[in-house]
Amino acid sequence: MHAPRSENETRREIIYLDNNATTRVAPEVFEAMVPFLTEYYGNPSSAYSFGKFVEGHLKEAREKVASLLGCTPKEIIFTSCGTESDNMAIWSALQTSGKRHVVTTQVEHSAIMNQTDQLERMGFGVTRLPVQADGTLSLSDVENAIRDDTGIVSIMWANNETGVLFPVEEIASLCKKKGVLFHTDAVQTPGKIDLRHVAKSDIDFLSMSGHKLHAPKGVGVLYVKRRTKVVPYVIGGGQERGKRGGTENVASIIGLGRASELALEKLSDEQTRVRAMRDLFEETLLQRLPYIYINGKRDQRLPNTSNIAFDFVEAEAILMKLDVAGICASSGSACTTGSLDPSHVLSAMGLTPARARSCVRFSFSHYNRDTDIDHALEILPPMIEKLRAMSPLNPEHTDNFAYDVEAAREKEEKLMAATMASINE
Ligand code: PLP
């Protein structure tokens, strides 16, 4: 994909179906932020009233974010992003517990995957739990993985690639029984599922990120349950009641407060209209195209996410053609796009590398209209047919054994074994 050559090119009408990568800033959010970038630029820690005024608005934003989780404002720590919140939860739990083992899954976001890799290099133990073919997780696997030296269990609430939901509240109760702290990366959930019961659950830490719920990029939240010990990850001034150093990103936090209110207002639209739009999109494609598969347990997913395997076609080719047509979608996580490796999430679900490389994620939002879906549905089936016609794996080709990816792999392996045998003879 080339970089846009002109401003006009990026400004043309686009159909944005990549809301798990990031979301547009809601106009109401932008409006709420502007005065804090122009007029009210005081530092909320300043003692004079110009600073105190800003501090008051920060307090209000904290209350609004707390309402989203049904918790108290004191349980909210503002951070710079979802990644920082994830890193802070794990690092803090290991520091306060003095333990050296982490339980997580094989399908986490790179914020957790790369941090736990780093912890392993530092000598900590990490257990990464596998998932089933439909992307779900076994509770007994979690239970069996917890050891005496486990400092934290960190399991995402919703997978960013497939939308599959994990039963984190049940897992949190299990951890509590075992006396182990529990963190969930809930970055993909606000505004899509109801989180107002979080404070009543046994979840100790929960991460969120502004740019996934129509607030700006560069602001995040770590919820820390009352009485759970926490130490700062970013060390500096006494901001955030001494739990996170650094002058607050005031305008973005104000925006996040407004976005949290909107997320609650739009929740039912997301769970009904957006879900119906997603389901119609999938059903129509399934009817029109052979050899396509929906990844992830269909009735245990976020309402806005669709991850589809288009056998015999490379996702990168689909995405390039969609880009030319003004449609934004993605393969895997935006943070790992560009890597030629198949998605670690789809690989953990047991997809063959060939099938994993054919998968495209479409993620909708309440800003999408029926016309967006109609347009995408008009474009996609003929596009896939054309790409398949050119593909060396074209299933219509009479002597093509790759009609079925599994059979193709088996046949490839047999051919290879026969060749090796004849060489060794
Ligand atoms: N966790 C998940 C599940 C995500 O999808 C993302 C972003 O894609 C992050 C964490 C990281 O959030 P941020 O971009 O705010 O650092």
Image: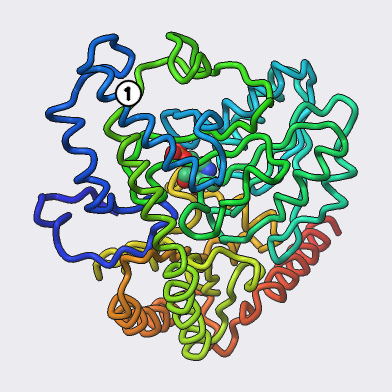
At 55% from the left and 49% from the top, the residue drawn is 341
The x, y position of residue 36, in whole percent, is: 20, 31
How has the structure been colored for display? rainbow
At 79% from the left and 20% from the top, the residue drawn is 99
Q: Is residue 352 left or right of residue 57?
A: right
At 71% from the left and 17% from the top, the residue drawn is 96
Q: Quadrant of residue 269?
A: bottom left
Q: Quadrant of the N terminus?
A: bottom left
Pointer 1: what residue? 55
The x, y position of residue 255, in whole percent, is: 31, 41
Q: Quadrant of residue 294?
A: bottom right
Q: Please state which of residues 126 and 6 is positioned toward the viewer in this rendering.
A: 126
Q: Quadrant of the C terminus?
A: bottom right
Q: Secondary structure at mark 1?
A: helix
The x, y position of residue 233, in whole percent, is: 54, 18
Residue 291 higher or lower than 204, as above or below:
below
The x, y position of residue 35, in whole percent, is: 16, 34
Residue 150 higher or lower than 28, as above or below:
above
Q: Please state which of residues 216 and 238 is positioned toward the viewer in this rendering.
A: 238
* Residue 97 seen in this snapshot: yes
